[in-house]
Each structure stands twice: as C-alpha cells, then as structure tokens.
Amino acid sequence: MNVKITVLTAACALALAACGDKSPPPAPAAPATTAPATTAPAETAPAETTPAASTTASAPVGAGGAAVVNDCATEIEGNDAMQFNVKSITVPASCSEFKITLKHTGKMPVAAMGHNVVITTLDDMKKVAADGMGAGIDNDYVKPGDDRVIAHTKMIGGGETTSVSFDVSKIKGDGPYEFFCSFPGHSAIMKGTIAVE
Ligand code: ZN
C-alpha cells in the first residue's frame, strides 16, 4: 500500500518535473507586416542646368547675352536644357511695334519642355507665372485675360517656332520689364530683361 503511493508520488513528481522543464511554446511568429509599397509619384527631376551648353545656340547673340535686334524684331531660342540663349532684349526707342520670334531648338515635346515668351513688369512676373501654372497648358500657361501680361507667344515644343508683336509704348512705363517662359518652373531660369533705349 505504502509502496504504491510512493510510486504514484514519484510518477507525479516526474510528471511535474517534466512539466516544469517544458519550455513555453515559441510565440507564434508575428506575421510579416508587408507595408504597402509607397508608390509616391516620382518627382520629375529638374533638368540639369548646364550654362555652358549654350554654345550650341545657332542664332547670333551679342555681348553679355544681348539679343540681336534688326528692324524692330529679334529672334531668341529656347532649348531642351531649359534655357533661353539671351539674357536681355533692348528695343530701339524708334520702334513703334516690336516682334519677338521664339525658336525651340530642342527635341522635347511641349508637354515636357514647353517654352513661350511672356512679358510683364518685374514685379508682376512671379504672380503671373504662378497664375499661369494654374491656367494649364491649354492656355499656354498664361491666365486668360490677365491684364498684367503685356505680350506673350503661344507655348511651343522642340522644333517649333512662334512669334508675337506688341506695341512698344506698353514697355515705356514704370519698369523694369522682364521676358520669361511661363512653363511651370521655367521662369526661375528662363528669364531676362527687356527695355526700350
Ligand atoms: Zn520653358
């Protein structure tokens, strides 16, 4: 009788010991939280500005990037590197009307590297460019009916040419006046002065 109890106790003790040795079951591995791939829209990297690349310009340019003016007209160029080939346009005071022809010497389409020429006062330039951005490409990135805009060409792509003529008296007031491209982001680089002398 006593022996039987002892054996049972021993068995129990062994069982307990076995139980105690049992290491807790491993925690279920946390399901790998596959974070959804962040499909952030790829920022369109701004075209690298290579100021020295203007050597490819075919139109004659005067000293200091001055546009060459003949018969109350000038031709300027825009390229795929987001540059105009001139920094300034001087309109002869003897002209009553002046014509600016813009030639896009690049190959990129208008939607990617469009250029135009917009003339405003220096004070209005940033605001006109910002409003133009909102107006969209269908409006040549110029707000329709914007009376701060003295003149502007249409927006063109690589290989295209456009022009605009305007009354010189419009830039004889309180300047200074600027010409620039209103394609989003371009006016920071594609700009220059325009003045009557
Ligand atoms: Zn442009």
Image (cartoon, helix red, strand yellow):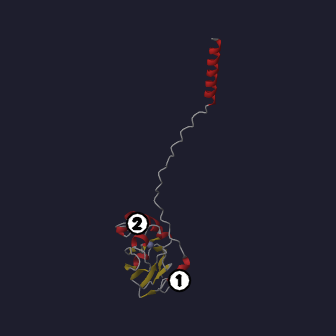
| Residue underneath mark 2 | 132
Q: Quadrant of the N terminus?
A: top right
In this image, 120 relative to 138: left or right? right
Q: How far from the left and from the top, in percent, is residue 4?
A: 62, 15
Nearest the viewer among 50 and 173 is: 50
Identity of the residue drawn at 64% across and 22% down: 13
In this image, 23 relative to 93: left or right? right
Q: Is mark 1 within 8 Å of ligand 1?
A: no
Mark 2 to mark 1 CA distance (whole Å): 30 Å
In this orientation, does residue 150 appear? no
Q: Residues within 10 Å of mark 2 (few under 14, many from 20)?
A: many
Instruction: Please tell me in which quadrant of the rendered image residue 147 appears.
Output: bottom left
From the image, state whether disc 2 or disc 1 is nearer to you.
1
Residue 55, which numbered label?
1
Q: How far from the left and from the top, in percent, is residue 58?
A: 47, 85
In this orientation, does residue 52 appear? yes
Q: How far from the left and from the top, in percent, is residue 99?
A: 39, 82
Q: How far from the left and from the top, in percent, is residue 76?
A: 45, 81
The residue furthest bottom is: 71
- Label 2: element kind: helix
> Callout 2, which amino acid?
Gly
Q: Earlier in the sequence, mark 2 or mark 1?
A: 1
Q: Is mark 2 within 8 Å of ligand 1?
A: no
Nearest the viewer among 117 and 96 is: 117
- Label 1: element kind: helix
